[in-house]
Amino acid sequence: MYGDIVLVKNEGCEFSDFPDAVAGSIAFIKRGTCPFGTKSKYAGMKGAIAAIVYNSEKDAVQGTLGTPSPDHVATFGLSGKEAAPVLKKLEKNQTVDAIAYIDAEVKQIITRNIIAQTRGGDQDNCVMLGAHSDSVAEGPGINDDGSGTISLLEVATQLTKFKVRNCVRFAWWAGEEEGLLGSDYYVANMRAEDNLKIRMFMDYDMMASPNFAYQIYNATNSANPNGSEELRNLYIDWYEDQGLDYTFIPFDGRSDYDGFIRNGIPGGGIATGAEGIKTKHEAKLFGGKAGEWYDSCEWAHG
């Protein structure tokens, strides 16, 4: 494929960010905020022949497009260092052309979720928590999301010391890194009466970031199913009771809670930092190094 490179406004998370000139050309999109699949889809809808997602940092960037869409186009990742001279020319309205070639394979594989539930407690009123059991090839996986899967095992172990009023259901999801496949499938295939038995879902994705921050998903009832805000406040109360600082992060559908809140089930969760840079304010709150990644392994796939 051959075409001119066209700069996309902002981070390509809205269809309106893509200029008409993208049609028949290669969209040049800044990494950040929304999934790569969203950027690629909007590029395709606007008529682009390919898309390049470039990093805001000097490092290389790779990603997944998630659930396949007929609007996706061939999508490449480019490091910030490689993107810099291209950006400089585009910002001066200079023409930059490129040849895009990709060799891809599309196939189906079988994955499995693992679900466990307490025998005790009201079986018609379940509290559910989950973490994903897969990782990406570019990262070691011990944090994303080995830390979440281990957290669930620890909760289950400690829960044996107590009696529960409501049943507790644990889920280890497959295919999260490929687009929340396991959790979306689980929720989408539940019967209506089974949906009503889940009172809330708690997500634990990346619980051991080395340059951490104590983060709470900012889930509100105004934007999510009723009960999400109460769950958020429960986390707040716990951190405050322990004398710990915390910060809020967007509840924007980028982890396995997404299928639950889209199907009317309250959700929330905590994390310690995914792709992203620790701020000076966060360094004062939690220690660590400002200006560096929460987890240096995360820049590879974002």
Image (tube, helix red, strand yellow):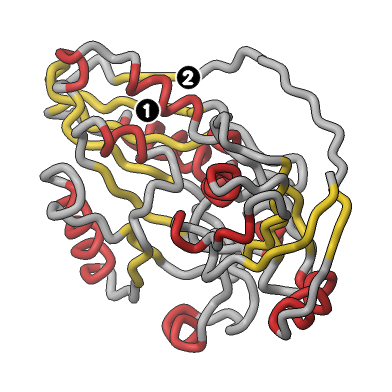
**Residue under label 1:** 170
Which residue type carries mark 1?
Answer: Phe
> Where does the image place residue 206, in percent across and percent down from the top left?
52, 51
Nearer-the-camera pick, 40 or 265: 40
The residue at which mark 2 appears reads as: 114
- Is residue 68 positioned above or below 51 on the image? above
Q: Nearer the viewer, residue 1 or 258?
A: 1
In depth, the one of 123 and 76 nearer the eye is 76
Indicate the secondary structure of the residue bearing disc 1: strand
Q: Residue at x 62, y 63 (%)?
A: 31
Q: Is residue 62 above or below residue 257?
A: below
Work out how far the residue at label 1 is from the one at label 2, CA to CA, in angstroms: 8 Å
- On screen, residue 97 versus residue 175, left or right, reads right
Q: Residues within 10 Å of mark 2 (few under 14, many from 20)?
A: few
Residue 16's image quarter? bottom left
Q: Nearer the viewer, residue 225 or 200?
A: 225
Inspect the image, locate mark 2, and give the three-letter code of the amino acid beneath it.
Ile
The residue under the point 14% across, 22% down is 196
Residue 285 lies, in percent from the top left, at 42, 83
Residue 224 visible, this angle: yes
In the displayed structure, does residue 115 sit left or right of residue 230? right
Q: Is residue 286 above or below residue 266?
A: below
Q: Position of residue 40 (x, y in %)?
A: 60, 46
- Which residue is at a point 19% across and 52% down the rendered structure image? 223
- Quick one: SS at disc 2? strand
Q: Residue at x 58, y 74 (%)?
A: 277
